[in-house]
Every structure is written in structure tokens, then in C-alpha cells.
Amino acid sequence: MTFELPVVETASLTAWCKMHLGSPAESELFRTGHLTRVIGTRLADGREVVVRVRPPATRIAACTEVQRRLFESGYPCPQPLAGPALLGAHEATAESYIPGGAMLPDSERTAQPFAAALAQLVHLAPPPGQVPSLAPAPAWAAWNHSRGGLWPRPEDLDADLNEAGGPGWIDEAGRAARQKLREGRDQAVIGHGDWITDNLRWHGSRLLVAYDWDSLITDSEAVIAGLAAAIYRYPELTTVTETREFLDAYATARRRPFDPGELQRCWAAGVWTRAFDAKQQHAAGQAVTTLTQDEADERLHQAGLHYAAATPRQSRTVNPAAAANAQLHGPSLPRHCSTTCNAPGRADQLSPIPTPSHGGGLPTVAFHARRGLEGREHLGLYVDAVAALAGIALAPSAGVLFRPLVFSAWDSATRNDATTVVDSSDNPARTPVPRQVTSQLIPAASAMTVCRVTLRRRVYP
């Protein structure tokens, strides 16, 4: 069964307006809505208002109160005029009508105006303790819901997403993101949980009005910013780069950077909402378009997370001896990695199998390195140090003869193979200064050689 918007008869609307606004509805300006029936109405006294009608919910009164306080503080939102009050079997509110405005600011896709307007909202909103509870949050933001199972129940689909089989990678992405969000102990604030293009109108680069105040939520600022950063371009899909730019702009607007844990939770919140939408699309029998497995991988990487997909892209064989010796350490790994002996597999399934160098040959490690989602990100592999005798690591100053390594990378965007020899004195061809650096210890299958490999993500302008 699909969700159906409330049916509002003209006579019922006219009577409601007369009772709660002091003037009956005279004509209809527009009628639209997704989860709420939204009706633009001209009253007999000449005022133009918007009446919003939806199923009754206790949180609506709290949303209306926060909206009222934001309006009084000067924030660009409609003025609440009446309600919530019953209209038949449903609940209605009325607010002032603010026509006009552009769908996008003058800067169009630039994240800064979107992020700054949200940061201002959070700053001006009352503390959660001063208003009634905004719980439960809308399903797409309800990562901390109290229902059983991973997924909350959608508001516009009569289905239990936890009973909808597959795709496994969506469930794994949502589960990993939810676990990361549970690590947070940040102070709760009030923000907008559906900060998307459809709910905003602009005059130049200034926000003219924000709509959909039923989507207010109480959560950490990291979650509120992270949700918006992942979806603000909707109905277009927000890219990873745009999400990063949004978070940077939000931190600038609030005049305080996110600490590393907060930033990871920002990214995790974005994974949660995109994965929820993807799961709902799948359950409804639609093509999954809101998130791809590659993008889930990239966004989880930014959140400091890795997960094993339930549906691998390709089966793989593992060398048991190498797997036993390959103890992986550190916070992250390159995505879509494989070894010289294995088919491409998940990053966290990597079992590097360097060729032993007893005869003086070159130890070889192969990585299946993926070009960035927008063709601008590349992975460079560098050796910091290669030295060990009988399992004892030796520093470069000890006079160890460093052995070169051969790195083989396959670019899935261009289908090109590339092999380079890099020695431990860090003499590869120079490329632009890295913006992000992660390190990984990869012990070789032979105890005679230990390779410390630094993976630097280089972003080209």
C-alpha cells in the first residue's frame, strides 16, 4: 500500500479558515505536497496563507513553536498563524504565504549559502529543553529510532524495510553508519532535517524563505550538518565533493571547525539518510538511485569506516598463509584493493602477498586502485621504510639497504594498467601536495621483509 495525501474538501477548508483565521477561504492559489497536503489560499479578507494538512502527531505542536521563535528572531521562515487544530481526521496549521524566490542562489551549486543558512538556523533555534519534544524524527533522519531492527518504518510506504531482502551492501552501509553515530556524545541542538533545494527559495545569495518546518529535529550539530551535506542538492544527487564543501562551509559559518570525531559523524549521518532512501527505493520495487555501492564505500571511508559487502563484486581466493601473516593496522585502507594473487575484493578483505625477496628480486604488491567518483581523486602509493631482519624493524639511520618495491595499479575509470617502481628513499615522481594522508602497515608473507606503505590521496584541482 502506498502513502496517500490527505483529501481536503473545499467546504472543510473554508470552515477551518473561518474558525481559526477569522476569515473563510475564498480561492485556492495552489495545492501540492509530499507527506503533507499544502494548500495556498486567499482568504475573504484579502490575506494569502498556506494551510498544511497531515495526520495528527504530537511533534507538530513543538515544530510550530520552534518555527514561531525562529520567525520572531528574524529568521526567513513563514509566520505561524494558526494551529495545530483538527481538520476532519487530520491536523492542520496555517502560516503566512511568501511567494517568489529562485530555486537556487546566484552561486547555484556552491555549498556556502546552503551551509551558512543552516548554521544560522541552528544558532537561532531555542535549546531543546525550552520546547516540547520533537521526537520521533522523520524516518530518513531517525538513525536512533526505538523500533526493532535496523531501519525505521517509512512514512510514505507501507512496508517494513527490515523484511525487504537485499541489497546487502545497503544494510551494511546503514548498520556501519548507525554504529558510528552511536559513538557520539555531542550536545543536542535543534535543526532542519530536510534541508534540500525543494524546501528553500533564494533572492540572489540570500535565503528568502525556508519551508517544511515539520522536518525539525533534535540531534547533534554534526548529525544535522551531515544530513544536510549529503542531500542539500535534492532532487539532484549531492556528490562527495559537494558534501565536503558543505561541511567546510558550515564549519566556517559557525566559526568553529568540527573535531575529527564530529567530522566522521557528519559523514556517517549522510550515509545513513542516503542508505535509508536507497533501501526504501528497493523495497518499493524501484531502481536504487540515491546511493551506489561505490559512493557508500567512499562516504564510509570519510567516516573512518569500512565494511564487508554482503554482495561482493567478484569472488576471490585467499592465500591462507598470506592472510595469516597480513595483519592490517591503522584507521583506513584504499578502496577496492586486491593482491597479485586475488581477484578484486573489498578493501577490508585485502590480503597483500608480496613476493619474497630472498633472491634479490623485487617484492611486488598489487592494488586495485579506483579513480575518484568525479575523476579528480587518485591514489599514490609510497614507501616510508622497508627494513626487517628476523622480524626486527630497523630505522633508515641504521644503514639498512632499502629494497625497491613494484606497485601495480589498475584504473577502473580508464581501464589502464600502470606499474611503477618506488624505492624506500621516497623518490617517486612528485605530484600535488596531499590533502589527506592515511598509513597502513602491511607485513609481508616472508618474515624477512616488512613494508610500511603510506597511502596518500591526492586531489587535483
Image (cartoon, rainbow, N blue to C red):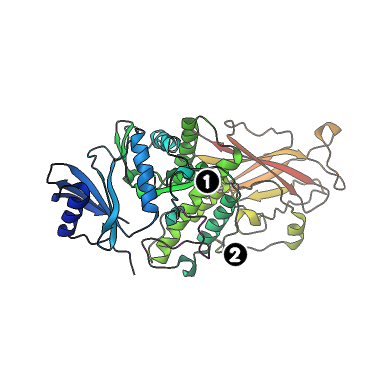
Say what secondary structure mark 2 lies in. loop
Image point (50%, 59%), residue name = 170
143 inside magenta stretch = yes
Q: Position of residue 26 (x, y in %)?
A: 12, 49
Q: Earlier in the sequence, mark 1 or mark 2?
A: 1
Which residues lie in the magenta part?
A: 142-157
Position of residue 402 measured from the top left corner of the image (x, y, whole percent): 79, 38
Q: Dot 1 corresponds to which residue?
A: 267
SS of the residue at dot 1? helix
Amino acid type of the residue tagged 1 in the rendering:
Trp
The answer to whether residue 289 is visible is: yes
Residue under label 2, please give it.
315
In the rendered image, residue 403 lying in the magenta stretch gets the answer: no
- Observer-side mark, 1 or 2, equals 1
| Relative to 328, 165 lies left or right | left
Q: Residue furthest right?
A: 390
Question: Which residue is nearer to you in this view: 22 or 206?
Answer: 22
Percent position of residue 32, x then y = 24, 53
In this orientation, does residue 233 appear? no
Q: Which mark is residue 328?
A: none
Q: CA distance from mark 1 to mark 2?
A: 29 Å
Amino acid type, mark 2:
Ser
